[in-house]
Image: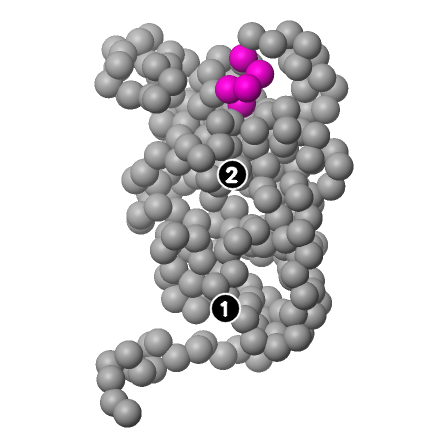
Amino acid sequence: MRSELFAATNQEQESAQAGLRLQNSKLLKIELRGEVFARQGAMVAYQGNVQFEAQGSGGIGKFLKQKLTGEGIPLMKLRGQGDVFLADRAADIYLIDLDGPHDGLSINGANVLAFEPTLSWDIKMVQGAGMLSNSGLFNCNFTGQGRIAITCKGTPVVLNVDQPTYADPQAAVCWSTGLQTGYQRADSIGLGTLLGRSTGEAFTMSFAGHGFVVVQPSEEPPGGFVGGTGGGHQSGQDGVAGVLGGLLGGR
């Protein structure tokens, strides 16, 4: 049998080292030798002895935060020995290595595909967001040492924050946790309704300090779940805001 389908570029990519790596730009291959966390529903194929365990939003504390904020990652734990292939609606996949306790990344939950269990993560309120709107007020913060796979809808741009930097909050995929962030109404800078939102609200995010921001050429619905509603659930709800203040302390 002959076909371009069987070209070497489409054959399974092999490696002698376990972990997360790219099969191609839209497929993540996990050479599993133990445990890895991944987004529920992202598995498209696997080989070997692999067990899949639903993890909710990553523990009771994160589950409560997800319910209050709309943010989070619906997780599954992959355990065993084998090869697992993950994808998310043919989005582009990028690998990021965090190198230690001083490395941190704030990521839109909708863009998290998989990560190694050596990383610590939590749901955090975005600094400067307050309770302005439902445009991604909460993100998933990762710290420690390990590899994470994120998705982008289209080829992103990585902006070095060496001058005042602004982005559509639904297009901002991730940024360095050391950056100072803020929100402002688009009206205040003359954009007005040019930044449309299904909610009728329009905000831009500001970034300052030293670090980077990754922006994709597409707007994600806010929230870690596809079609999620982000932080909009709590707007104007003082009781919920009080609970959030306790859960999301140290933002």
Taking depth in this image into account, of 175 and 76 the one nearest to the observer is 76
Residue under the point 31% across and 83% down: 6
Return the x and y of residue 245 as percentages of the image width and height.
Answer: 69, 17
Taking the image as shown, residue 121 lies to the left or right of residue 155, namely right
| Coloration of the structure image | one colour
Q: Which mark is residue 135?
A: none
Taking the image as shown, residue 219 lies to the left or right of residue 62, namely left
Amino acid on which disc 2 is placed = Phe
Taking depth in this image into account, of 211 and 59 the one nearest to the observer is 59
Res 172 → quadrant: top left
Return the x and y of residue 206 as percentages of the image width and height.
Answer: 42, 22
Gap in angstroms between the C-alphas marked 1 and 2: 22 Å
Residue 62 showing in the rendered view? yes
Amino acid on which disc 1 is placed = Ala
Q: Which mark is residue 45?
A: 1
Q: Is residue 243 above or below residue 100?
A: above
Q: Is residue 151 inside the magenta stretch?
A: no
Residue under the point 56% across and 8% down: 236
Taking depth in this image into account, of 105 and 99 the one nearest to the observer is 105
Please rate how many residues cluster around mark 1, counting C-alpha atoms within 10 Å: few if below 14, some from 14 to 19, many from 20: few
Dot 1: element? strand
Taking the image as shown, residue 77 lies to the left or right of residue 167, namely right
Res 5 → quadrant: bottom left
* Stretch of the chain drawn in magenta: 231-235
Q: Which mark is residue 225?
A: 2
Residue under the point 39% across and 79% down: 11
Mark 1 or mark 2: which comes first in sequence?
Answer: 1
Residue under the point 34% across and 22% down: 198
